[in-house]
Image (spheres, rainbow, N blue to C red):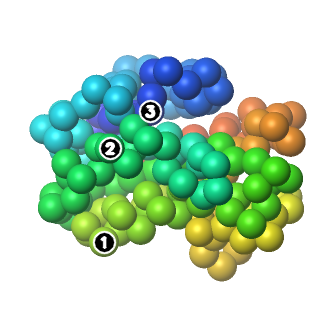
Amino acid sequence: MNKIGLFYSFNTVKTKQQVNKIKKSLGEDNIEEKNVEEITQEEFNKYKNYILAIPTWFDGELPNYWDEFLPAIEDDSFKGKTFALFGGGDQKGYPENFVDGLGLMADFIEKRGGKIVGLTSTEGYQFESSKAQRGDKFVGLALDIENQAALTEERVSKWVEQLKKEFK
């Protein structure tokens, strides 16, 4: 397996907890952590395999740090690159846009030729709508630490096992 670039904000507590679980399951030697708040276009583009942490903010928005970085890579091609997405949302507090950030990022990547892996079932979640939903799947790992924290460990573990098969 090629080195995986794992991009997230180093300032996020809940995301960092999930990153640690992912690193432990995938093997730390396979991952290079990058702070999305400080990366350059060149640093971002050097990988073949990516894991992107995409929490959903407010009413279905990307975090500011992703919004600020995406213009730097909007003209890049992601052909031949593989992306796995994970992120948190609150299905009770924001049921009408649960984990929308995942869907927004998946659309951005796919428009540039990137491949999304790590789709997960929507079963076990209760929400009204989500831009991350495609049929009965999410475009990544949807986590709800606020309402389903007890399910997080198992969800992360299953997702990482899936990624081991999908990343080349």
Ranked by sequence position, the earlier of labels 2 and 3 is 3
Q: Farthest residue in the bottom direction?
A: 135
Neighbours of disc 2 within 10 Å: few (<14), some (14-19), many (20+): few
Q: Is residue 23 above or below residue 4?
A: above
Neighbours of disc 3 within 10 Å: few (<14), some (14-19), many (20+): many
Secondary structure beneath dot 3 equals strand
Amino acid type at mark 1: Lys
Residue designated by label 3: 8
Picture residue at 54% right of the left edge, 54% below the top: 61
Residue designated by label 1: 111
Nearer to the camera, 167 or 116: 116
Ranked by sequence position, the earlier of labels 2 and 1 is 2
Nearer to the camera, 70 or 161: 70
Picture residue at 13% right of the left edge, 38% below the top: 42
Between the residue at mark 2 and the residue at mark 3, the CA separation in whole angstroms equals 13 Å
Asked if labels 1 and 2 touch by Cβ distance under 8 angstroms, the answer is no
Mark number, residue 68: 2
Ranked by sequence position, the earlier of labels 3 and 1 is 3
Between the residue at mark 2 and the residue at mark 1, the CA separation in whole angstroms equals 18 Å
Picture residue at 49% right of the left edge, 43% below the top: 63
